[in-house]
Structure formats: structure tokens, C-alpha cells
Image (cartoon, rainbow, N blue to C red):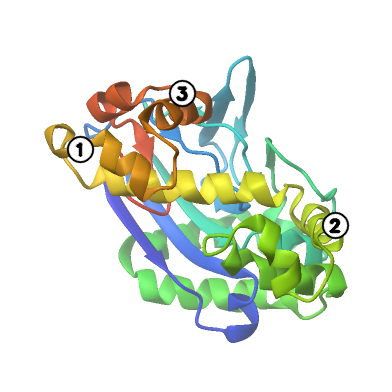
Amino acid sequence: MQIWSQAPKNQTIAKYVALYWLIEKTDEDESNHFPKLNPEPATHLILCPPQQRYSYQTLPTESKGKGCHWLYPQQQSLQLDHSERFIYLGVKFHIGALYSLNVEGYNHPTLNRAVNADIDQLLGTESSDVEQLIELGRTEPYKCSDKLDELLLPLFIKTNEDQHSELTRKALPLLDEYPISELGERLFCSQRTLERSFNRVTGLTMKQCQSMNKLEAMLEYLYQREAVDIDWAEVAFKFGFSDQPHLIRHLKKQIGLTPTNYAEQRGLTIDIYGGVESR
């Protein structure tokens, strides 16, 4: 399975886009056919061949379709269908970035959905251009990233920046460093003002976003270790849980697995598609 990710070089784009990524599964790959994605507070624009199917399932709902699509922030883990060969070229936006962008047809905030994307209208390209871009990503990641910079730049020429987006942008890097109750004081505003601005820009509460970030960091930490080497009491302490039962309840609620089940299955793809390959 081929996987890569690259940060945009253009600084105007980098303000709104975290990274570009590609994942490809061929007929020879024997990866998990039905991996899961952990909850994700960011939006992804995913480019793929027009007849390629996608499916994101959280019982009892499912988002499915063909071709290029938006994957909006997800508050629960999703099960994918990777039983057939596929290739995805993705754009991962910073959390809340779509609030500031003029994307036609987008109703902000949109959560827990995947919907088809009209790439021709969005980027001024044709289907053949998208397929050429995907092929470039397959063989030359750096050139593909440069081309994405070129195609996306017109989206960022006119943006809607206001006090809500600016305050949220300042708060985001602090979520993993300080208690949420302290952030209003640190940003010289009332806690209520901060909470309202954050929810308006991201569609999420700061607590929800912080929880997703912590889960992401913890799963990546666990992914890098063999099951026999994991000390769950130590993990609970490291990631700020009151005790091991608290950690067990959290994992069960967020991804539907107990720590032991997770250690045995390792069925998650870290950081949506653009991170660590699922086993």
C-alpha cells in the first residue's frame, strides 16, 4: 500500500490546509478490508476516479457514493470498505477552515457526513485533469503537491476572516496544553465568548475537539507498540485519565472497542487516510 503526505508550500494555502495526502491499495495488497477511522475534527476534500466507490459507515447510518467527495468532521469512528483496489488523493483542511472559505453549496457547519464534490466547479478543472493529478500523485508526490497549490490558490484569494475565526485559530493550539476553563483568560476574553466563537467556526465544542485530539494522540501511541508491551495503567496516566476504568469507558464510547480488543485488532487508520497505515 502506497501512502504519503506533504504540507503545502504556499503560505496563503498553508493557513487553511494542513496537508496533502495520498493512499493507494492495489490488488496485491492484503491490508484490512474494513478498517476504521477514528473521530476527526477536520474536513477533507478527497479526489478519486469518477467511478470509484466510497463508503463511510457509522451504524445505523452510511454515507456512500462515487468519485470525488467531501468528508466533513466526524464525531464517531467510521468503518470503511477497502475490499477493492482504490486510490485517494486528499486535502486535509485545518479545523474550522471552511468557515472562512467561499465554497459554493457548503452549509456551515456540516458534521458527520460525506457528500459528492463538484471538482470541476470548485477548482475549474475537468475530470481528465483530476485523473492526471492523481496519476502525478502516484509517481511524483512533490510535483503533485505543487500542482495542488496551484489549483487551490484561487479558493483562498477571497476569504471571510472575522473575530470568530481569529479567536478560534488562537485557541486551537492551546487545547492540548491547558485546561479549557483557562483559555478565555489566556486569550483575554470571556470563556462564554470563546466557547461561542469556537462552536460557530468549527461546529464543535472545545471539549469535543480536545477529546478527539487526545484520542488521536493516544491511538498513534498505541499503534507504535506491540500488545504485550502496553501498560494500560501507564497509558491512562500519560493521557490524563483518572484511572484505567476511565480509559476503558472512553475507548468503548469513542471507537466501540475495549483496550484489549483494540490491541488485538489494530483496525484503525490513524489521522484519517493521511497518517499511519492500518495493519
Q: Residue furthest left?
A: 228
Q: Residue at x 67, y 63 (%)?
A: 182
Mark 1 and mark 3: Cα distance apart in space: 17 Å
Q: CA distance from mark 2 to mark 3?
A: 31 Å
Task: Give the foreground label among 2 and 3.
Answer: 2
Label 2: state its secondary structure: helix
Counting residues from the start of the chain, the first of labels 1 and 3 encountered is 1
Question: Could you say where residue 73 lies in the image, as x and y percent from the top left?
Answer: 64, 45
Q: What residue sits right under mark 2 in the picture?
A: 192
Q: Amino acid at mark 2?
A: Arg
- The residue positioned 30% from the left and 21% from the top of the image is 261
Q: Residues within 10 Å of mark 2 (few under 14, many from 20)?
A: few
Give above or below for 198 relative to 32. Answer: below
Mark 1 against mark 2, which lies toward the viewer?
2
Dot 1 or dot 2: first in sequence order is: 2
Q: Is residue 188 visible?
A: yes
In this rendering, would 183 be left or right of 277?
right
Mark 3 — residue? Answer: 252
Amino acid type shown at disc 1: Ile
